[in-house]
Amino acid sequence: MELPIELSLEQEFSLKTYERQVKGLNEEQAQGLLLEVLRQLMIKENVIKHLIAQIE
């Protein structure tokens, strides 16, 4: 199974949009945003693991 490792054009556009928004943040805001993104990635990982467990 080949995994897509490149971003789609839509994802690239979203990334550039976020990049512009992040450049305007101060250090405290950036740290808060980073922690929130990490929290959401962990939740995503948990959901994926749960869904895979349901299939098995």
Image: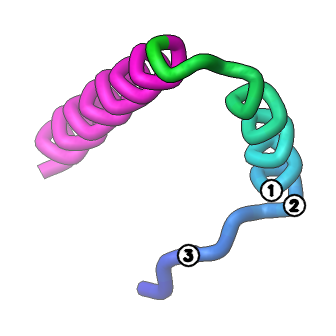
Query: Is residue 19 depicted above or below 21 in this figure?
Result: below
Residue depth check, mark 3 versus mark 1: number of the one nearer the observer: 1
- The tag earlier along the polypeptide, 3 or 1, is 3
**What is the chief secondary structure element of the magenta stretch?**
helix
Q: Which residue is mark 2?
A: 9
Question: Viewed as shown, does residue 20 lie left or right of 36?
Answer: right
Which structural element holds mark 3?
loop
Q: Residue at x 42, y 85 (%)?
A: 1
Q: Are marks 3 and 1 in contact (CB under 8 Å)?
A: no
User: Which residue is denoted by mark 3 in the rendering?
Assistant: 5
Q: CB under 8 Å between callouts 1 and 2?
A: yes
In the depicted structure, whether residue 30 falls above or below residue 41 = above
Q: Which structural element holds mark 2?
A: helix
User: CA gap, disc 2 to disc 3?
Assistant: 13 Å
Q: Quadrant of residue 20?
A: top right
Q: Residue at x 87, y 49 (%)?
A: 13
| C-alpha distance separating marks 1 and 2 | 5 Å
Identify the amino acid type marked 2: Leu
Give the residue drawn at x 80%, y 56%.
12
Q: Describe residue 29's horizontal placement relative to residue 48 as left or right.
A: right
Inspect the image, locate mark 1, and give the three-letter code of the amino acid beneath it.
Answer: Glu
Work out whether 19 lies above or below 6. Answer: above
Name the foreground residue: 27 vs 30.
27
In percent of width and height, residue 46 lies at: 20, 32
Which portion, as a residue range, is magenta? 29-56
Residue beneath disc 1? 12
* Residue 32 counted in the magenta span: yes
Question: Which of labels 1 and 2 is toward the front?
Answer: 1
Asked if residue 55 lies in the magenta stretch, the reply is yes
**Residue at far bottom of view:** 2
Give how far across and how far down residue 48 sits, in percent. Answer: 29, 40
